[in-house]
Image (spheres, rainbow, N blue to C red):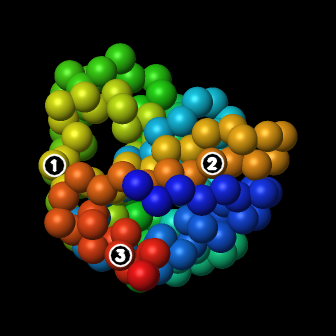
Amino acid sequence: MPSVTTRSWQETVELGSRLGAVLAPGDFIALVGELGAGKTQFAKGIALGLDVDPGTPVTSPTYTILNIYEGRLPLYHFDLYRLNGPEDVENLGFDEYFSGDGVCVMEWAERLGDGMPRDALTVSLDHAGTEERSVSFLASGPRARAILQALFPA
């Protein structure tokens, strides 16, 4: 499981941008970590890597649950913080986005439970100091492994 330490929010955004540049339609990125761990900063970077207009504010969709951004591919940015579990997501019908024409980035993805797509890249962000973050990557399927290979070539 690759792991990187970022030393500022800007480095977290840059790492997300590198990931966004290698993503393709149907990719699912699960972001996990406690409050303030950098999930939204990482998502901002993914948006930049997907060529979302840099002037577009990429914010956490905590209250709207889903924000859609147009770039090289559509970015479906979810935040499940306010949901209670997988049944809430199922009731909202969001699974139709999970293998569609764009990229899904889901904050608080652990709340999906068994509803997590089988082929997903999980990115865990943890506090490693005041500004530092430990960012770990775990691939759960062939496409997710290909993404990791592209992000961290040997």
- Quadrant housing residue 75: bottom left
Q: Mark 2 points at which residue?
A: 134
- State the residue at coordinates (54%, 75%): 18
Question: Can you say whether 61 is above or below 22 in the image?
Answer: above
Which class describes the residues within 10 Å of circle 3: few (<14), some (14-19), or many (20+)?
few
Residue 107 in view here: yes
Question: What is the secondary structure assignment of the residue under circle 2?
Answer: strand
The tag earlier along the polypeptide, 2 or 1, is 1
Give the quarter of the figure containing the C terminus. bottom left
- Could you say which disc has been placed on residue 149 in the image? 3
Which class describes the residues within 10 Å of circle 2: few (<14), some (14-19), or many (20+)?
some
Q: For marks 2 and 1, give the one nearer the viewer.
A: 2
In the picture, measured across the screen, residue 53 lies left or right of residue 78, that is: right
In the picture, measured across the screen, residue 122 lies left or right of residue 136, that is: left
Question: What is the secondary structure assignment of the residue under circle 3?
Answer: helix
- Could you say which disc has been placed on residue 118 in the image? 1
The amino acid type found where label 1 is placed reads Arg
Q: How far from the left and from the top, in percent, is residue 150?
A: 38, 80
Q: How far from the left and from the top, in percent, is residue 29?
A: 37, 55
Distance of label 2 from label 3 (alpha carbons): 19 Å
Q: Are marks 2 and 3 in contact (CB under 8 Å)?
A: no
Question: What is the secondary structure assignment of the residue under circle 1?
Answer: loop
In the picture, measured across the screen, residue 144 lies left or right of residue 124, that is: left
Q: How far from the left and from the top, in percent, is residue 145?
A: 27, 66
Residue 40 in view here: no
The amino acid type found where label 2 is placed reads Ser
- State the residue at coordinates (61%, 39%): 126
The amino acid type found where label 3 is placed reads Gln
Distance of label 2 from label 1 (alpha carbons): 24 Å
Q: Nearer the viewer, residue 33 or 135?
A: 135
